[in-house]
Image (spheres, rainbow, N blue to C red):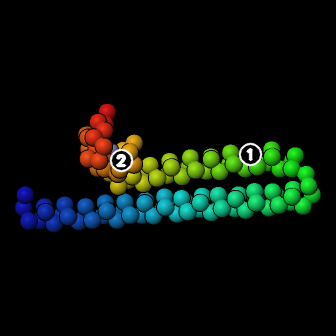
Amino acid sequence: MSFFDKVKQGASEAAKKAQQTVEITKFKTQVSLKEREIDKIYKIIGESVYTSYLSGDYTQVEANVSEYCQGIAQINQEISELEQKIAEVRNEKECKCGKVVAADTKFCSSCGHHFA
Ligand SMILES: [Zn+2]
């Protein structure tokens, strides 16, 4: 490869890296927005439980709380999808043991899991 080809390749790799950083930042922003949504729901759950305590009637809150918790579970699911996307952009994947490895890895270096 000529010197100029190497320079060109280096430049396009730098551009690709910059693009990756932009995408990762975008996904991370979405993750923190969703985490804030979860915090809001936690607060609502706390308030509704306290309101029930004051009124001495917990019959209504039970249904509400389980609805709010389903909402949190849904958002957590969306967060893990975003984290999956971040790993893909980084050219990484996560093993079932939790170790993050390069996307083309065949065996996990931590637990020995064979990726299909
Ligand atoms: Zn593993």
Task: Identify the residue at the far top of this view.
Answer: 116
Q: Quadrant of the C terminus?
A: top left
Provide the residue designation for mark 1: 66
Q: Mark 2 packing: few (<14 Cα in 10 Å), some, or many (20+)?
A: many
Q: Residue at x 74, y 45 (%)?
A: 66
Q: Quadrant of the N terminus?
A: bottom left
Provide the residue designation for mark 2: 93
Q: Is residue 114 visible from the viewing direction of this image?
A: yes
Q: Residue 15, position in %: x, y?
A: 30, 64
Quadrant for ligand 1 reads: top left
Q: Earlier in the sequence, mark 2 or mark 1?
A: 1
Q: Residue at x 25, y 61 (%)?
A: 13
Q: Nearer the viewer, residue 23 or 105?
A: 105
Question: Which quarter of the picture shows residue 70?
Answer: top right
Compared to 110, does 6 lie above or below?
below
Identify which amino acid the numbered label 1 is placed on. Answer: Ser
Q: Residue 76, position in %: x, y?
A: 58, 50
Q: Mark 1 packing: few (<14 Cα in 10 Å), some, or many (20+)?
A: few
Compared to 112, does 84 lie above or below?
below
Q: Are marks 2 and 1 in contact (CB under 8 Å)?
A: no
Identify which amino acid the numbered label 2 is placed on. Answer: Lys
Q: Nearer the viewer, residue 92 or 27?
A: 92
Q: Is residue 28 left or right of residue 96?
A: right
Q: Is residue 36 left or right of residue 98?
A: right
Q: Confirm or reject: label 1 Cβ below 8 Å from ligand 1.
A: no
Q: Confirm or reject: label 2 Cβ below 8 Å from ligand 1.
A: no
